[in-house]
Amino acid sequence: MDIALVFIIVYVLLKLLRGTRAVPTVLGMVGLALLYWIAIAQGLATLEFVLRSAVFYIGVLIIVLFQSEIRQALIYFGNRVRIPLLRRQRDGLGENIYDEIVLATTTLSANKTGALIVIERGVGLRNFIDAGVQIDANLSYDLLVTIFNPSTPLHDGAVIVRQERIAAASCFLPLTKNPNISRELGTRHRAAIGITEGSDAISVVVSEETGLISFIEDGEIRRNLDTKKLRRLLLKAMDMPATSTKEAKKESLKDPEKSALSEAESKVIA
């Protein structure tokens, strides 16, 4: 039982620290633990004493050297362990908000205007909002396009969306330290990935060089998206129905017999 528990702990640690420079250290700690176990089993008193005495100092050294990785791992773990009393309820945005974001992103993409939009979910982003230029205005297509216009002072940095409002602009975010990220991705994309690694936020990026649209969630980036794919990913990430009300109305107008049949079926079921 003890051995199984140790293996589970090591597996979880490796999974949390995957892609970071702390992985070799964890493997080294496992090696020391095995050596300590062998020393006890074989009655090597001196080696056992040395390893036991070094545990405290090794622990302090690891915390100092890998505090950033440990912090990211704890945040990652905390984002995925849901405790109702401690977590904020994730609220979906109004349907028109998604339309405004997608439309603005499409316009910025066509003009090859760089942009980074971060949408807050369960984990608060107050630290980044306070460090940026606070706006607290209704989210709209015009405002997003204006903010990211290269001639405005707020275009450099990220826009953070909180509860259907633009909370702040010109926000600077932590860059990802994942060594597996493609080198062709610049600072804007790395910041978009970094904020989703340290929180449950999602981000949308428009490349200034290519105009390509990317969507990032949980540190995973999806690139070269069109309008439909972007909207679908946004709705899915915010736990919204994949088919919008507008689209459903259009379908019913195209095929009234199908719409009437579905309504009749729903009444029969009820």
Image: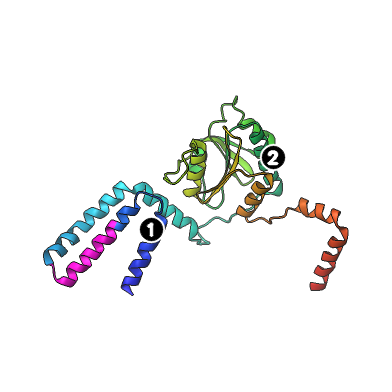
Image height check: is 252 above or below 43? above
- Judge left or right: residue 99 versus residue 83: right
Given residues 195 and 127, the one toward you in this image is 195
Mark 2 lies on residue: 103
Q: Position of residue 87 (x, y in %)?
A: 52, 57
Residue 123 in sight from this viewpoint: yes
Q: Mark 1 against mark 2, which lies toward the viewer? A: 1
Q: Which residues are magenta?
A: 28-44
As drawn, the label of residue 14 is 1
Mark 1 Cα shell of 10 Å, populated few (<14), some (14-19), many (≥20): some
Report helix, strand or loop for mark 2. Answer: helix
Percent from the top left, x then y, of residue 128? 49, 40
Type of the residue with mark 1: Leu
**Left or right, 224 with reference to 53:** right
Rendered image coloring scheme: rainbow
Residue drawn at (65%, 33%) of the image? 145
Quarter of the image for the N terminus: give it: bottom left
Q: Percent from the top left, x then y, of residue 129?
A: 52, 40
Residue kind at label 2, given as amino acid type: Leu
